[in-house]
Image: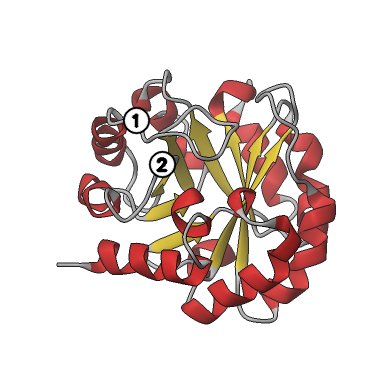
Amino acid sequence: MIWRERVRSVEVEPSLYAADFARLGAEIEALLDAGARVFHFDVGDGHFVPPVTIGPIVLRSISKLVRRRGGMFDCHLMVERPEHHFEAIAEAGGDSVTFHVEAVPDVAATAAAARVHGLGVGLAFNPETAPAEVARAADAVDLVLCMSIHPGYSGQAFMPNAYARIRELRRLLPPGVRVQVDGGVGDENVRELRRCGADLFVCGTAVFGDAGPAAGYARIVESVEAP
């Protein structure tokens, strides 16, 4: 898959949901200069999660900027009936879509619908869902996203039980399926999360809450790469 070939062995993914939207283009440029290549793009529908967040119109407005620098968009669909959005996400410049196991009746069919549009596929699960339930469906996807907060709002505190959930998830998944973690991830816990088996780290407040996003990103990368 093209998505699997382009994603590096470890990625710190700035979550644009936490960005300053008055300065979105400038913040993305600064992060690209700092080495960021995969940007996490959250879509909420006001049903599966309470807030209505950014969507394909915003994605289209920034996709050329990111793509001409070799970057990618990893789109997290916190929505009911995610298959209704795959075409629009792909046309707007998305590279992968991650939908929630709690939102779909048939993971394999939903993943197949995403691949029709050339998208990489991820499967997310909420803190109350057992890793074993997700692992049973993982043959159909490229990554599994372990939520370390309840999805919907940026800035929540990391839930420590995510460490054990990620260890169990990594043990159960096929070797080629990546483990992603999202929620309260920063330089203080990213190294331990990597030890547990995660290799894709979604960071919102820890990047954009800093004096400058590039500095926040660099600090997290330094932490995850520390021996």
Looking at the rendered structure, the kind of residue marked 2 is Gly
Nearest the eye: 27 or 150: 27
Residue 112: x, y in percent?
66, 42
Disc 1 + disc 2, Cβ < 8 Å: yes
Find disc 1 in the rendering and name its residue: 159
Nearest the eye: 58 or 92: 58
Disc 1 crowd, CA 10 A, few/some/many (<14, 14-19, 20+): some
Query: Which residue is situated farthest in the front direction here?
Result: 211
Q: Between disc 1 and disc 2, whose residue precedes?
A: 1
Horizontal side of 188 relative to 103 (left or right) equals: left
Residue 144: x, y in percent?
45, 41
Mark on residue 184? 2
Looking at the rendered structure, the kind of residue marked 1 is Met
> From the image, which quarter does the N terminus lie in?
bottom right
Residue 181: x, y in percent?
41, 44
Residue 92: x, y in percent?
81, 59
- Residue 213, above or below 158: below
**What secondary structure is found at the residue carrying circle 2?**
loop
Tell me what residue is drawn at x 76 percent, y 57 percent: 59
> From the image, which quarter does the C terminus lie in?
bottom left
Instruction: Report if residue 211 is visible in the image.
Output: yes
- Residue 94, above or below 141: below
- Residue 58, above or below 84: below
Horizontal side of 88 relative to 23 (left or right) equals: right
Tell me what residue is drawn at x 60 percent, y 31 percent: 152
Disc 2 crowd, CA 10 A, few/some/many (<14, 14-19, 20+): many
Mark on residue 77? none
Marks 1 and 2 sit apart, C-alpha to C-alpha, by 8 Å
Nearest the eye: 71 or 219: 219
Tell me what residue is drawn at x 37 percent, y 35 percent: 158
Tell me what residue is drawn at x 55 percent, y 27 percent: 101
**What secondary structure is found at the residue carrying circle 1?**
loop
